[in-house]
Amino acid sequence: MPLSAAAALAREVIAPCPRNTPALTRAEAETLLAAIPNWTLSPDGTLLLRSCVLPDFANAYALVERIAALAEAADHHPDIAFGWGYVRLTLQTHSIGGLHRNDFIMAARIETLPH
Ligand SMILES: C[C@H](O)[C@H](O)[C@H]1CNC2=NC(N)=NC(=O)C2=N1
C-alpha cells in the first residue's frame, strides 16, 4: 500500500535551516497543506496552525507531552497553548520568520500521534 502524503512527509528529514533560506510562498505552502488537512495557514501565510479538541485537561496535557517529545527529537518546536479540552499549535521557522518545509514535516509527524 503506498504511503499517504502525510506519512511520507512525516518520514522526511528535518534539516537545519540557514537564515538566508527564503520562506515558502503562499502557493508553495498551500500545495504542502493538502497533505495535512487538519492544519490551516494564518492570513499572512507565515504560520501553520492546528486546534485539537480533547476530552479534558489530562488528555490535553498528555498530548502536549507527546508533541514536546517529538519536537525535542526533531529540534523543531511548535508554540503550544493548551487548557481544559484543547490544544492549539502554531508552527513557524523562527530563523526565517515564515514557513519552511520543516514546519510541514513537523506537522505531519504530529498527525501520526493518536488524537
Ligand atoms: C539551535 C536550534 O536548532 C534552533 O534554535 C531551532 C530550535 N527549534 C526551532 N523551532 C522552530 N519552530 N523554529 C526554529 O527556527 C527553531 N530553531
Image (cartoon, rainbow, N blue to C red):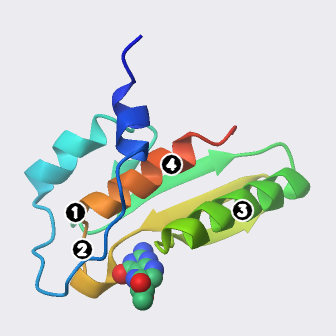
Label 4 or label 3, whichever lies nearer to me, is: 4
Check disc 2 and report the residue beneath it: 98
> Helix or strand or loop: what does disc 1 sit on?
loop
N-term-proximal mark, 4 vs 3: 3
Q: Quadrant of ligand 1?
A: bottom left
Question: Image quarter for residue 112?
Answer: top right
In front of the other: 57 or 3: 3
Label 4 or label 1, whichever lies nearer to me, is: 4
Residue type at mark 1: give it: Gly
Question: Image quarter for residue 102?
Answer: bottom left
Check disc 4 and report the residue beneath it: 109
Q: Residue at x 12, y 51 (%)?
A: 28
Residue type at mark 4: give it: Arg
Q: Residue at x 75, y 64 (%)?
A: 65
Q: Residues within 10 Å of mark 3 (few under 14, many from 20)?
A: some
N-term-proximal mark, 2 vs 4: 2
Check disc 1 and report the residue beneath it: 45
Q: Are marks 3 and 1 in contact (CB under 8 Å)?
A: no
N-term-proximal mark, 3 vs 1: 1
Q: Residue at x 71, y 55 (%)?
A: 86
Check disc 3 and report the residue beneath it: 64
Q: Can residue 37 be seen in this snapshot?
A: no
